[in-house]
Image: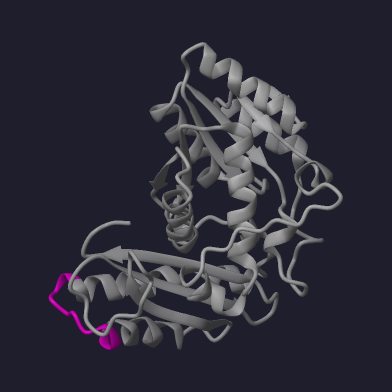
């Protein structure tokens, strides 16, 4: 596996791969790799000839009171995991590589970025869209793999790719979960033992709503109520939002008639860790 820091060297690597007739699959990450990330590498290898992973803790997508400074950065362990997963190249730029002095350009996907997580993190998706477009321009992938856990991110990036004619296919991969259902996340390491015990209630609530849907319930308020009823049994998991929205435009639904995203975001009471999860009903992302 090649480990590359310079954007220009990464571009040369990709250009050589394309000249050799190889397609490239990209897995953008912020590191602290877990099985969810590694499953995306497997998808990239399935759909492309070469798999590239990027590791960059992007300051532009963190708010001023968020966890940028303490976000885990176990780079040596991440390099080993990426190599074992079959990455052909690991792109590990520094902040000065991605945002050199004088950097002043941002990408904003309006409307889609303002809802759900964007309501409480107003600059987040601008930071995501900006860094991902830079990664697309540097790595020049044919496909890019993202997990469904970050469903709003996927929807925002699909719109960016469509609007800006970026020749990249966005591949959405299933959420990878712990044995008790908790969606894998690098931030799970922040949870206290009590919070970790309670956190699977998020997915249990989503499953309860999906079970109601499967039985014929279409009223969004009733589906949401099934989730909230379970949350009340776990007081250390505090709801930020529970929303049922259209998968294409993220607009709230009163009744589910086509593909809908049931999305939840919570804060934990002790460590103040933010957890997100979702399921899709009536179709797919």
Q: Residue at x 13, y 76 (%)?
A: 216
Question: Quadrant of the image for the N terminus?
Answer: top right
Q: Nearer the viewer, residue 78 or 142?
A: 142
Residue for point 39% across, 29% down = 47
* Quadrant of res 253: bottom left
Q: How many marks?
A: 0
Q: In this view, does 5 lie above or below 183?
A: above
The span picked out in magenta is 214-222
Residue 44 at x, y = what percent? 46, 32
Front position in the image: 176 or 4: 4
Residue 130, x across and y down, in percent: 63, 54
Left or right: 201 as drawn, with respect to 196: left
Q: Indicate whether residue 85 is drawn in magenta.
A: no
Query: Does residue 190 sit above or below 98 in this rendering?
Result: below
Q: Is residue 256 left or right of residue 196?
A: left
* Front residue (pair 272, 151): 151
Residue 279 visible, this angle: yes
Looking at the image, the residue that sits furthest to the left is 216
On the question of residue 198 being in view, the answer is no
Q: Which residue is drawn at 37% across and 87% down?
A: 229
């Amino acid at each position: 596996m090649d480990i590359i820091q310079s954007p220009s060297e990464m571009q040369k690597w990709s250009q050589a791969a394309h000249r050799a007739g190889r397609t490239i699959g990209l897995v953008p990450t912020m590191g602290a790799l877990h099985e969810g990330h590694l499953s995306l590498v497997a998808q990239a290898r399935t759909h492309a000839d070469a798999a590239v992973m990027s590791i960059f803790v992007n300051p532009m997508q963190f708010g001023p009171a968020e966890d940028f400074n303490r976000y885990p950065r176990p780079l040596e362990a991440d390099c080993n995991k990426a190599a074992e997963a079959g990455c052909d190249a690991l792109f590990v730029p520094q902040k000065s590589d991605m945002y050199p002095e004088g950097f002043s350009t941002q990408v904003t996907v309006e409307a889609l970025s303002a809802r759900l997580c964007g309501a409480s993190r107003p600059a987040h998706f601008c930071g995501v869209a900006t860094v991902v477009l830079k990664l697309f321009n540097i790595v020049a992938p044919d496909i890019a793999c993202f997990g469904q856990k970050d469903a709003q991110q996927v929807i925002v990036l699909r719109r960016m790719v469509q609007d800006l004619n970026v020749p990249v296919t966005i591949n959405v991969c299933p959420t990878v979960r712990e044995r008790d259902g908790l969606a894998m996340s690098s931030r799970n390491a922040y949870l206290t033992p009590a919070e970790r015990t309670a956190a699977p209630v998020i997915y249990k609530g989503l499953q309860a709503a999906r079970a109601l849907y499967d039985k014929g319930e279409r009223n969004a308020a009733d589906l949401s109520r099934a989730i909230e009823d379970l949350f009340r049994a776990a007081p250390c998991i505090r709801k930020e939002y529970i929303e049922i929205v259209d998968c294409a435009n993220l607009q709230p639904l009163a009744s589910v008639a086509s593909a809908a995203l049931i999305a939840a975001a919570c804060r934990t009471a002790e460590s103040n860790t933010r957890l997100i999860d979702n399921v899709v009903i009536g179709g797919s992302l």
